[in-house]
Amino acid sequence: MYKHLRATGLVLMSLIAVETGFFGAAQAGEFAFESVRLRGGLSGGSPLGKERQSDFNQIDLAATIRLPWEKDLGGGWMLGTRMLASIGALRGADETNGIMTVVPLDIVLGRKDGLIAIDVGGGGALLSDYKFGRQNFGGAGQFVWTFGVTSRLAGPLGVGYHFQHYSDATLYGQDSRGVDLHLIELIYWFDRRE
């Protein structure tokens, strides 16, 4: 199931990029430090495919870097790319372990003024320990898939929500389990787009 989900996500992102002419007519921008985010949240439901064996919560500090590939869609809207990285703690079954994530390509559809933006991306995560009581993630390296919505509320300040899924996609065997998290973000943007 994970292989099909991963393949579907890659095909969907590719189709969006091709359909909008993103690769052919994208404006060359610059790499820019975009935002810093304080995030926290809880597990909910079950991970895609298997029931989790513990409740989880996570707190982390995340940063985004705007990548140079973006396209003006007109009407104040744009399609862009960024990289997201985080470092923090994941807690479950009375155990707390460190976690780092890197999402090297996060595709963003949003208003230029930042009032609303929707993003989707995938990358990797590294856990300092992958066992939380009875729940075994299978190994330290995990895939991470993320989907989110953000909004600037007042100048450089804003809020966001991200759904984040950790999984090993059965690389460590059929018995490993991931987790789905719902993260609320407090955001500070460094760029001053109007």
Image (tube, rainbow, N blue to C red):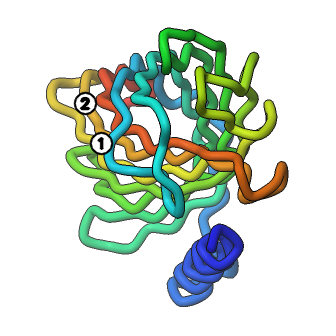
Task: Mark 2 and mark 1 in contact? Answer it, CB < 8 Å.
Answer: yes
Q: Residues within 10 Å of mark 1 (few under 14, many from 20)?
A: many
Q: Quick check: 175 left or right of 64?
A: right
For image coordinates 75% across by 29% down, the residue present is: 126
> From what the image shows, is residue 129 above or below residue 7?
above
| Residue at image location 75% in from the left, 17% down from the top | 128
**Circle number at residue 81:** none
Residue 55 in the image: above or below residue 114: above
Task: Check the image and report above or below for 23 versus 174.
Answer: below
CA separation in Å, label 2 and label 1? 6 Å
Give the camera-side residue of 66 and 41.
41
Label 1 sits on what residue type?
Answer: Thr
Between 37 and 94, the one nearer to me in the picture: 94
- Identify whether 123 is placed above or below 96: below
Quadrant into which the N terminus falls? bottom right
Q: Amino acid at mark 2?
A: Val
In the rendered image, which quarter is residue 23 located in? Answer: bottom right
Q: How many marks?
A: 2
User: Mark 1 = which residue?
Assistant: 150
Secondary structure found at label 1? strand
- Name of the residue lying farthest toward the left: 153
Residue 111 location in percent, x, y?
Answer: 29, 56
Measured as percent of width and height from the top left, residue 145 is found at: 57, 52
Q: Is residue 145 visible?
A: yes
Query: Which residue position holds label 2?
Result: 159
Residue drawn at x 29%, y 42% as measured from the top left: 150
Point out residue 129 in the picture as x, y percentages from the top left corner: 74, 19
**Front residue (pair 25, 134):** 134
Which image quadrant: the C terminus?
Answer: top left
The quarter of the picture where residue 137 lies is top right
